[in-house]
Image (cartoon, rainbow, N blue to C red):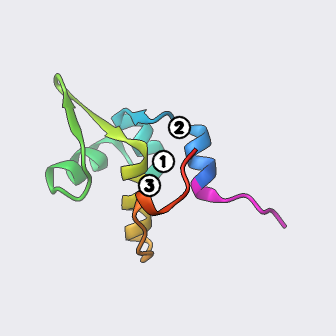
Amino acid sequence: MSDIDPIEELRRQYPTILTTAHVAEMMHCTIGDVRDKVHRKDLKAMRWGHQFRFFRDEVIATLLAGSGEDVDPDDRDQP
């Protein structure tokens, strides 16, 4: 049995600031789905020219919120 924390594994695998493609990979969805989530305000993003950028820990918090866990990224130990 593995003791790997999936949240820490995401933090290890992805940079602090993410592209739309990174987020789609993390969420196992399409880039279009990520853009739709941003436009519906289900996912926070920053405009970077004509593109979006995302903070990794905010994306993780969104994933956790969707899983039913009540977790604020500031409540977790961050490296």
| Pointer 3 with pointer 1, Cβ within 8 A | no
Q: Nearer the viewer, mark 1 or mark 2?
A: 2
Magenta run includes residue 25: no
The residue that mark 3 highlights is 60
Magenta run includes residue 6: yes
**Vertical arrangement, residue 4 with respect to residue 22, above or below:** below
Looking at the rendered structure, the kind of residue marked 1 is Met
Instruction: Please state the horizontal and vertical placement of residue 17, each as a whole percent of the image.
Output: 39, 33
Name the image quarter holding the C terminus: top right
**Vertical arrangement, residue 20 with respect to residue 29, above or below:** above
Q: Secondary structure at mark 2?
A: loop
Q: CA distance from mark 2 to mark 3?
A: 11 Å
**Vertical arrangement, residue 15 with respect to residue 75, above or below:** above
For the magenta stretch, what is the residue range? 1-7
The residue that mark 1 highlights is 26
The residue that mark 2 highlights is 14
Does label 2 or label 3 sit earlier along the sequence?
2
Q: 10 Å neighbourhood of mark 2: few (<14), some, or many (≥20)? A: few
Does label 1 or label 2 sit earlier along the sequence?
2
Instruction: Please state the horizontal and vertical placement of residue 39, each as a whole percent of the image.
Output: 15, 50
Q: Residue shown at 42%/44% (left/top)? A: 56
Q: Residue furthest right?
A: 1
Q: Answer with left or right where residue 72 lies relative to residue 11.
A: left
* Most common secondary structure along the magenta stretch: loop
Q: Residue shown at 57%/56% (left/top)? A: 7
Q: Secondary structure at mark 3?
A: helix
| Pointer 1 with pointer 2, Cβ within 8 A | yes
